[in-house]
């Protein structure tokens, strides 16, 4: 059942060096606050899993928290490159990063297989592409009824899932609405889960829309308003497109990146102080 | 009547928009495809259903999204589905008619690379990767490819095949057992390439106004075949340009006040 | 794209003798009106697919429309037996009925595989049970990564899906809310689909909840108020538990069943006249 | 204090309800299990999460549903999921702690038959079939079985195995690679059977008040083992009976007026 913890405590309790971590969010509801807390606590040797690693994964990679990245699209959406990810791949900065690379369809299926307790998923992807040549986790098998070839990938079963949602009730039932990506599957596929929320309310349900993840699938809920910034939380605040654009400048050079992270992340006590510092310096 | 002035990019977007049918169902990414679809829906394709891979089905943005998961897309969508459902049921299940693709590299059979330039293990340039492109390429009934034409982008041999076109040409794609018919056209800033009905090699079939056939051949990294009769694209109309230029990007959100109200005066 | 048809025309256009038909509904939103129209048009040699065949499938079987039934639970929910189904199985009345029998998990997976264009589905069911002994469509295969054994069933790909929903807009986008069962998967798995709705409105979307099935996945929409009776349509009318209980009496004896069907179904022109006749005789 | 009067069925339901923990997560079918869970939620298990296989998660019906998809269940649920998600993620994924099962036949190892009596190909009695029972039996962490005790229901050999219990006893279930630990008790109208820790054969461990061990043995189709010390179930308390008897079935809906308004005066 769910514990209500502050974010520092939740990360300290549930995230260990070497863990497989899926901090998911498909453009919407990306758990930035939780990601920054991992950096503050200097938790290392992580295998980071995410379909669309963006700024927060760029930061984790740049700060050396990740040994491996499992992903299907690594860019700054609508902007361009993730420079910390590129430097890790192209030049091993700050250290080499192992990649397990997929397409979206493969990862969505692999999460669902993980949530369903299956060892693998089947779909029809990757035909005619180079991916099976570079990823040994892509295999093929024959339909036992028709003989047709299908594609198989292993299930994703993280140690910890981290997501951000709009609301939780006081028992720890979580409610999210809008673009839901693979968040529910990631939570159900993981041994433990941390959910940061905008608001804690008396009751959540689906009668006016949205999706509820029941409390017994959630390990910890943390009340972190604005916790998805610079991503957005539908009904609470919009996406800071300006920050995504500025990240391109901040992150392009490794030294400038380190300086920025030192000042705003390592140098601040928690997410609230980080946001206040960003505000003071005109980032929000 | 004076000729309207337009950029090569505007020509590309207009040419792409015209390819969409009145009641098309189109899967789109950010950038030029998004502009093309939004232009089409505001001109000849009033019943166009636009789908972005974040899970928004039949969306009607009033502004151009910066990302495929822009709030504007879910706010105006008829339905928002999980990424699992989007890829398995809608794409792989064969329910999407038209897809737009782009890439860093294309070869003569319309295969695409958006993964790496150079060797996969030690890339010269690490690109974002596959995303939904392999499935769009395989499962949409037809695709259109949009990219700027140069010897760096239209290459003799891809460094990596991210998304399949006509594979090795002729009927080789048929052996993959995927429902989509493959890329129907490559729309560049110089002109139009279409697959030869037998060889499935992309052939120059039209150039945009003011572009020579030689310039298009010169900007291609393989010996580009030229159709017996090369057409000229109809330039953008004043109406098309007006609508296209009226499309505004989605605005950034300012959370400054919210930061103050939540966190000023001491977060714990 | 969607055509708006009256129900008689929709069944005549889309349903042919010998078709594989999935008229789905999991207690809620069962397409009774459409099923009765199949009986009126005497369409035969059907393969009927449904997880929970209840009264309407009992009627189709009793009237001889079905050659085969693919199912996972065949009873009158909360009441007891489906006597027409039992007589067909136990005594071949009115003629022999081929059964392909599954568990719920298998059928839910098989529909989803059908919707996804896959030839088969994998899951972990049937272990230690007798089903693989009597159903050759249950096979086992090994995970290509771990060697673990998983269960496989063929995808369900009906010729026609029939469902009932609360609303459609004037373009044919369908909206349903409440218990959704496998209806969306059934529609997406089928070559054609017929949707009966309570109401036609200007616009449907999910902003206040519910699920939209977009118009290009729907072949025909028919406006049939109360079309789920004796099942229910959340937000429109409740379940007629009384009719489910009375069906036990009506259907127990084959002759009484035939007489009842003659009077109320064959003897009425359409669903509206059927309901009026039921009302006249105190069934509603 | 006068002893409350109760029926054998009420004893079964009360005994089942007591097995549920304060914050249990329970998967229930219609009939006695539904009564037991609703009783428990109104007595000692205030934080019980009830799940019905129609897709309703954490539902709180104010009346007893007649079917697993009763409107009352979706109206009061925290979440309603597709049947695919219910079976794949919640059940097979291992997120449900407790399941209730019933059947027409049970054998000494807790394997169940709800499919056919007689030969499968030409059955004497065709029963409804599997539904969700095989998955409840395999994937809930623990299950409880509720059925009335007789030589027809507790049989030497099942005609068909619909849902697996301890298979052939001892550690044979472990070979199935299913996460659930199997049936923890069989609660009948006569008493309680629990699995022997080694053989996994169900053994009589308690009888309900007024029932003799001999009567329980006599009503069993296999030579029922009897525990060294057979307990007696605590009878239902007045409080339990009051709550149980206050549970009302969901009402039928009358659509007569709606039939008139939609269809009287000539449907086309």
Image (tube, coloured by chain):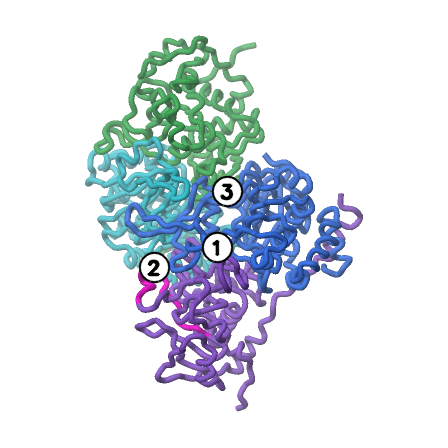
Chain colours: A cyan, B green, C blue, D purple
Q: Is residue C134 visible?
A: yes
For residue D176, the mark is: 2
* Residue B221 horizontal/vertical position (percent): 31, 17
* Residue D91 horizontal/vertical position (percent): 42, 58
Q: Chain of mark 3?
A: C
User: Mark 1 or mark 3, which has the lower sequence index?
Assistant: 1
Instruction: Depth check: give the residue in front, C4 or C63.
Output: C63
Q: Chain of mark 1?
A: C
Q: Which residues are magenta?
A: D171-187
Q: Are marks 1 and 3 in contact (CB under 8 Å)?
A: no
* Residue B203 horizontal/vertical position (percent): 40, 15
State the separation of the CA atoms marked 3 and 2.
30 Å
For residue C157, the mark is: 3
Residue appearing at x 42%, y 44% in the figure: C120
Q: What residue is pinned by disc 1?
A: C104
* Residue C46 horizontal/vertical position (percent): 59, 45
Q: Quadrant of residue B208?
A: top left
Q: Residues within 10 Å of mark 3 (few under 14, many from 20)?
A: many
Q: Residues within 10 Å of mark 2 (few under 14, many from 20)?
A: some
Dot 2: element: helix
Dot 1: element: helix
Q: How many marks?
A: 3
Dot 3: element: loop
For residue D70, the mark is: none
Q: Quadrant of residue A68?
A: top left
State the separation of the CA atoms marked 1 and 2.
19 Å
Q: Are marks 3 and 2 in contact (CB under 8 Å)?
A: no
Q: Residues within 10 Å of mark 1 (few under 14, many from 20)?
A: many
Say if the magenta span includes residue C280.
no
Instruction: Tell me whether marks 3 and 2 sit on the same chain.
Output: no
Q: Is residue D70 visible?
A: no
Q: Chain of mark 2?
A: D
């Amino acid at each position: 059942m769910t514990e209500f913890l502050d974010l520092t405590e939740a990360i300290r309790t549930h995230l260990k060096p070497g863990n497989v971590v899926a901090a998911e969010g498909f453009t919407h509801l990306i758990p930035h606050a939780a990601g920054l807390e991992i950096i503050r606590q200097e938790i290392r040797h992580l295998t980071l899993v995410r379909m669309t690693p963006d700024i927060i994964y760029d930061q984790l990679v740049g700060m050396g928290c990740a040994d491996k990245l499992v992903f299907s699209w690594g860019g700054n959406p609508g902007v361009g490159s993730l420079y910390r990810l590129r430097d890790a791949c192209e030049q091993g900065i700050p250290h080499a990063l192992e990649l397990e690379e997929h397409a979206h369809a493969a990862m969505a299926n692999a999460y669902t297989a993980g949530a369903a307790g299956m060892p693998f998923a089947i779909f029809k992807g990757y035909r005619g592409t180079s991916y099976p040549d570079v990823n040994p986790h892509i295999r093929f098998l024959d339909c036992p009824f028709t003989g047709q070839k299908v594609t198989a990938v292993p299930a994703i079963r993280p140690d910890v899932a981290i997501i951000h949602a709009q609301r939780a009730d006081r028992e720890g039932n979580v409610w999210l609405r809008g673009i839901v990506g693979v968040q529910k599957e990631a939570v159900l596929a993981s041994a433990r889960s941390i959910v940061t929320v905008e608001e804690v309310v008396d009751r959540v349900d689906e009668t006016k829309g949205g999706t509820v993840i029941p409390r017994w699938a959630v390990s910890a809920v943390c009340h972190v308003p604005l916790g998805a910034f610079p991503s957005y939380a539908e009904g609470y605040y919009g996406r800071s497109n300006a920050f995504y654009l500025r990240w391109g400048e901040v992150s392009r050079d490794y030294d400038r990146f380190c300086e920025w992270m030192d000042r705003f992340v390592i140098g601040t006590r928690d997410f609230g102080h980080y946001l206040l510092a960003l505000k003071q310096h005109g980032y929000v | 009547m004076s000729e309207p002035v337009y950029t090569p990019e505007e020509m590309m977007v207009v040419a792409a928009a015209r390819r969409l049918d009145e009641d098309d169902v189109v899967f789109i990414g950010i950038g030029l495809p998004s502009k093309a679809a939004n232009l089409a829906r505001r001109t000849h394709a009033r019943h166009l259903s636009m789908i972005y891979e974040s899970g928004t089905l039949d969306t009607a943005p009033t502004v151009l999204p910066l990302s495929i998961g822009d709030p504007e897309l879910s706010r105006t969508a008829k339905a928002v589905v999980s990424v699992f459902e989007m890829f398995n049921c809608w794409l792989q299940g064969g329910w999407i008619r038209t897809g737009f693709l782009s890439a860093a590299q294309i070869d003569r059979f319309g295969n695409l690379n958006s993964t790496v330039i150079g060797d996969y293990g030690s890339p010269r340039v690490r690109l974002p990767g596959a995303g939904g492109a392999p499935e769009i390429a395989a499962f949409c009934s037809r695709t259109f490819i949009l990219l700027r034409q140069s010897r760096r982008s239209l290459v003799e041999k891809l460094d990596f095949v991210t998304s399949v076109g006509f594979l090795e040409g002729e009927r080789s794609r048929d052996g993959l057992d995927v429902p989509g018919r493959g890329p129907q056209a490559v729309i560049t800033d110089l002109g139009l390439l279409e697959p030869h009905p037998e060889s499935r090699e992309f052939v120059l079939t039209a150039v945009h106004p003011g572009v020579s056939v030689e310039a298009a051949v010169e900007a291609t990294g393989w010996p580009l075949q030229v159709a017996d009769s090369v057409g000229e694209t109809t330039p953008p109309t004043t109406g098309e340009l007006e609508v296209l230029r009226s499309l505004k990007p989605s605005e950034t959100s300012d959370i400054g006040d919210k930061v103050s109200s939540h966190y000023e005066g001491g977060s714990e």
